[in-house]
Amino acid sequence: MKKIAVFTSGGDAPGMNACVRAVVRTAIHHGIEAFGIRRGYEGMIEGDIIPMDKSSVSNIIQLGGTILQSARSKEFRTKAGRQKAYDNLKAAGIEGVVAIGGDGTFTGARVFLQEHPDIPFVGIPGTIDNDLYGTDYTIGYDTAINTAMTAIDSIKDTANAHNRLFFVEVMGRDAGFIALRSGIATGAEAVLIPESKNDTDHLFSILENNLGINKMANIVVVAEGDEAGGAFSVAKAVEEKFKGQFDIRVTILGHVQRGGRPTCMERVLASRLGMESVKALMEGKKAVMLGQIDKNIVFTPFEKAIKHHQELNPLLINMVEILN
């Protein structure tokens, strides 16, 4: 293998730059030319493929976002679009590709490989949601929960100062990993997540108990995909139930969770997966996602990584109920 390319796709996640750096420098270490594809599959279709050397990835390990940028590509969903992407990869002499992203990224790679199996793709899980099957942690998750934790700590200060009930919405359209861990770490009274049903009734019970002991300052962490709706919907339901007994405020953390400097754990994980992805291509692997489980590198077929999702640890849910 003489030439490989790396790209980032889907939502950006802290640690992606550290991973790109590791791919490029590992390739060079093994005498392989490294290339970057800008703007994901869209850049692949447009032939936006650039050579990269050690200096290309110098001083980026600490940066959030992605220097290769990311974009969603409607055209790549068409056979004609994928043919353009293939032709551009062949023209550049690319013999293997490292795809950093999530479900959508791996779905695109899987379909591409069915049509063009001669250019192997391997995937690296890059998403703050931590919902991909086949790895303990995804790139971006550790930074996201620490960002959320820091923000909620700050909100808790003002909640205590004014005896207010704060609803803090964190990201997690389909998964409550960020909400659950940040809620435990900040001592939230309740955590509302998509995986747990009837959260609102349980929340009412908690708040009624707190009223009984005159505890007016409360933090409730809400995953944006919770069945009761986002934080504003939950806050409205609580206001209607308790009719002014709580001074309620809502904070949406939003995309602040996607940015920022990656944590130490994030940088190490991203670097290891990036390094191992080059080795995987050299060993002839393709159509697999690399992950780290119990400190070991594992390979999960794209099909399995896409169809299955990591499940929440029920012990963590129990922790919230016991420690609130």
Image (cartoon, rainbow, N blue to C red):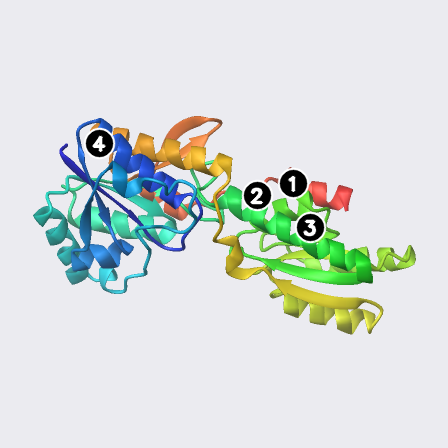
**Residue depth check, mark 3 versus mark 1: number of the one nearer the observer:** 3
- How crowded pointer 2 is (Cα within 10 Å; few <14, some 14-19, many 20+) is rated as some
What residue did someone put label 1 on? Answer: 316
**Nearest to the observer: residue 134 or residue 221:** 221
Q: Looking at the image, is 12 positioned above or below residue 268? A: below
Query: Label 4 is placed on what type of residue?
Result: Ile
What residue did someone put label 2 on? Answer: 312
Viewed as shown, does residue 79 lie left or right of 226?
Answer: left
- How crowded pointer 1 is (Cα within 10 Å; few <14, some 14-19, many 20+) is rated as some
Query: Label 2 is placed on what type of residue?
Result: Leu
Q: Residue at x 32, y 31 (%)?
A: 275
Compute the Cα span from label 4 to label 1.
Answer: 42 Å
Compute the Cα span from label 3 to label 1.
Answer: 19 Å
Sequence-wise, the earlier of marks 2 and 4 is 4
- How crowded pointer 4 is (Cα within 10 Å; few <14, some 14-19, many 20+) is rated as some
Compute the Cα span from label 2 to label 4.
Answer: 39 Å
What residue did someone put label 4 on? Answer: 28
**Nearest to the observer: residue 96 or residue 115:** 96
Question: Is the residue under label 1 in contact with that under label 4 (CB below 8 Å)?
Answer: no
**Residue depth check, mark 3 versus mark 2: number of the one nearer the observer:** 3
Q: Residue at x 21, y 62 (%)?
A: 78
Query: Would you say residue 148 is visible in this rendering?
Result: yes
Compute the Cα span from label 2 to label 1.
Answer: 8 Å
